[in-house]
Image (cartoon, rainbow, N blue to C red):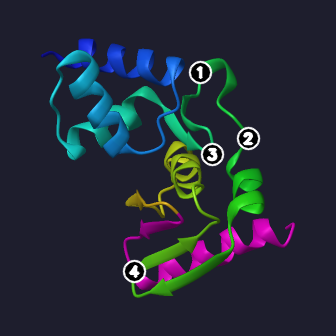
Amino acid sequence: MNKTFRQGQILKLIASRRVLTQEDLARELKNGYGIQTTQVTLSRDVRQLGLLKTSDGYRQVTPATQGPDLANVVAELLRDARVAQNLIVLRTSPGNANALAVALDKEELPQVVGTVAGDDTVLVVAPDARTATALREKLLGYVRGG
């Protein structure tokens, strides 16, 4: 099964029904199309297709409507930010971590080595502890309106 076909089926699935998790997506691909895939592959597909996890399930963000900028996303979704050495743990309300991680990734900030999103938590990897602390302050500044 090639990547283009699999990703096309993913887009068809999310357009036709509510798909809330990657487990749901894997199950629908297997049952509906006979496509077996791993969680790692699905995560990559979700990122490459520009899918956002919303309360209504995965949705594709088209290039013409890439959504709000990082400052607005952080101001709306961020509930807490804690630093642990070179890591920043960002907390959101349930179901919003992916949207925050996507916004961070799209900014391509030099302070961000990478992100990993769960349901309500984003792990941000910074190059060092000092950079992590500075990035936390920058993100909290968006929440404070500055």
Identify the mark nearer the N-term, 2 or 1: 1
Question: What amino acid is found at the position of numbered circle 3 in the picture?
Answer: Ser
Identify the mark nearer the N-term, 4 or 2: 2
| Front-most of residues 67 and 142 | 67
Few, some or many C-alpha atoms within 10 Å of disc 4 (few <14, some 14-19, many ≥20)?
some
Q: Is residue 79 left or right of residue 8?
A: right
Query: Residue 24, how many percent across, how many down?
Result: 36, 40
How far apart are the two marked residues, 4 and 2, measured between alpha carbons? 27 Å
According to the picture, the residue beneath numbered tag 4 turns out to be 86
Identify the mark nearer the N-term, 4 or 3: 3
Say if mark 2 contacts mark 1, CB within 8 Å: no
The label on residue 68 is: 2
Query: Residue 50, how many percent across, how many down?
Result: 48, 31
Q: Secondary structure at mark 3?
A: loop
Single out the mark in the foreground, 1 or 3.
Answer: 3
Res 90 → quadrant? bottom right
Dividing the image into 4 quarters, which one contains the C terminus? bottom right
The label on residue 63 is: 1
Q: What's the magenta region?
A: 120-146
Q: Is residue 103 left or right of residue 124?
A: right
Question: What amino acid is found at the position of numbered circle 4 in the picture?
Answer: Asn
Few, some or many C-alpha atoms within 10 Å of disc 2 (few <14, some 14-19, many ≥20)?
few
